Amino acid sequence: MPHLQHVRCLPALLGLSLVVAAQDAGVRGGATSMPAVQARSLEPKDPARRIEIEGCVEIRVDADAIRVVLAVCSDGADPATVSTANQQRVQRLRAAFTQAQVPDGNVHIDFIAMLPVYDWEEVEEAGRKVARERLSGWRLQENVHVAVGTQEQLDTIKRLAREVGVFDVLAVDYASSDVEKHRTRALEAALAVAKAKAAILLAQFGTPQKLVNVTERTVTVPPHAQYRSFESANTARMERHFRDETPRVFAVRPKNTLYEGYTADVDRPGGTLPMRPQICVVSSVKLYYESPEKVEAAGEAKK
């Protein structure tokens, strides 16, 4: 589950107002692919002289701490006006949080930037008309970080933000105080799966095979990395004559995003359907056994 791209320059240049609906990954969410978790493979000189068996397990963990990052932005003709306007918006947001009994220590204001905004002005230079950029105003962005403990509290924070006119959710991060314990559980489960596979497969040889090596890889996949974004738009293309100088401004085609969960192949998934954002702990274990060919060759050498 995998959750930034937060500065939108085009709307500022065109003088447009753009409101983006965000899911619980923030606007950074939308991984296009989910890489499989695999333990490192050994590279012996003769691969035929080993048997490699892998076990992979996923464990889903509910978060006990959640951070949401909200972007509070204001535009104006000069920096002083913009600063005053943004400060008022931040104060209204903090007052809403206080009323919802969010502790002050769980809120942090992060100044991002005061950026100039430009538009085009048509002027005459050397007897010809040219379009020259000119300073038209300023844009201030401050990010408000809020820490909560449950999904219900997160939903409340987002609702309060919308009520005071803050719509940009940049990121939502999930954490668990027990993640180390779950990593150990996943590793033990992956090892058990690999051993169970080995018991079935190696029984076909009739003689016990010696375990000679083992590798593992255990990773924690945050929920924002488990979202997928895609475009679903009915679009057409129109060609124009080269003498047609009419400017064309294309409509915004927002992407669709969904929580897809961890989709790479595992032997033992952490659950059924991915119904809500969860931290995924994925562990892969590879066991290496001597092949019968090597054992027989060693026996022949002793003779």
Image (tube, rainbow, N blue to C red):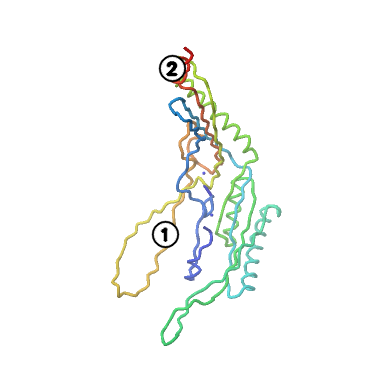
Q: In this view, does 21 lie above or below 225?
A: below
Displayed quadrant of residue 96: bottom right
- Residue 88: image x %, image y %? 65, 66
Check the image and report above or below for 229 versus 214.
below
**Crowding near the residue tagged with mark 2, few <14, some 14–19, many ≥20 C-alpha atoms within 10 Å:** few
**Residue type indicated by callout 1:** Arg
Closer to viewer: mark 2 or mark 1:
2
Q: Please provide percent x and percent y for residue 276.
A: 52, 43
Q: Which residue is drawn at 62% across and 64% down?
A: 89
The span from disc 2 to disc 1 (Cα, nearest Å) is 59 Å
To which residue does mark 2 refer? Answer: 205
Callout 1: helix, strand or loop?
loop
Nearer the observer, 63 or 246: 246
Residue 253: assigned label: 1
Q: Do callouts 2 and 1 mark residues in contact (Cβ within 8 Å)?
A: no
- How many numbered marks have been drawn onto this rendered protein structure? 2
Check the image and name the residue furthest to the top.
303
Crowding near the residue tagged with mark 1, few <14, some 14–19, many ≥20 C-alpha atoms within 10 Å: few
